[in-house]
Image (tube, grey):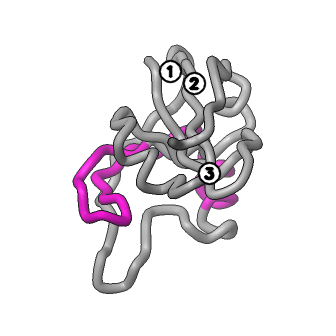
């Protein structure tokens, strides 16, 4: 599956990072930074679908490192949830929880936002 990540400055792949299949949402997150396109295979990964972004609290699942550590300890590799970008556009987010998930990612390109 091909996914996108919008970064304000530069792109560095890491656990905790979020991706979307909506390139326009990735551009909104990047603002004037870069958008990375990656390919990820979920084969063999524990992918969990969870409740989505809480707009009132500005809180997304596993925003806190302690939450990610607990999820990884429980064997979760990737969280999938409903989200919205900074423009309010709804999209799906895939958040990498484990280093196994990071290892399943192949970076295709990193391009500046026009």
* Residue 23 against residue 91 in the figure, above or below: above
Q: Which mark is residue 38?
A: 2
Q: Mark 3 and mark 2: span between their CA atoms? A: 16 Å
Q: Residues within 10 Å of mark 1 (few under 14, many from 20)?
A: some
**Magenta part of the protein: which range?**
68-93
Q: Is residue 86 magenta?
A: yes
Regarding mark 1 in the picture, which secondary structure is present there? loop
Q: Nearer the viewer, mark 2 or mark 1?
A: 2
Q: Mark 3 and mark 1: span between their CA atoms? A: 27 Å
Q: Are marks 3 and 1 in contact (CB under 8 Å)?
A: no
User: Left of 23 or right of it: where is 110?
Assistant: right
Q: Residue at x 73, y 39 (%)?
A: 13
Q: Quadrant of residue 38?
A: top right
Q: Quadrant of residue 94?
A: top left
Regarding mark 3 in the picture, which secondary structure is present there? loop
| Quarter of the N terminus within the rendering | top left
Q: Which residue is mark 1?
A: 42
Decide which of tag 3 and tag 2 comes sooner along the chain: 3
Q: Residue at x 69, y 59 (%)?
A: 69
Residue 26 at x, y percent in the picture: 45, 45
* Residue 63 against residue 38 in the figure, above or below: below
- Front in this rendered view, residue 24 or 75: 24
Q: Residue at x 68, y 41 (%)?
A: 98
Residue 68 at x, y percent in the picture: 63, 58
């Amino acid at each position: 599956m091909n996914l996108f990540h919008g970064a304000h400055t530069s792109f560095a792949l890491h656990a905790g990072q979020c991706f979307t299949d909506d390139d326009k949402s990735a551009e909104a997150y990047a603002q004037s930074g870069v958008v990375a396109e990656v390919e990820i295979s979920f084969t063999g990964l524990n992918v969990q679908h969870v409740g989505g972004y809480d707009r009132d609290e500005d809180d997304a699942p596993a925003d806190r490192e302690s939450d990610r550590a607990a999820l990884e300890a429980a064997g979760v590799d990737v969280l999938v949830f409903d989200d919205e970008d900074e423009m309010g556009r709804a999209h799906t987010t895939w958040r990498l929880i484990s280093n196994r998930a990071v290892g399943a990612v192949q970076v295709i390109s990193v391009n500046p936002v026009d």
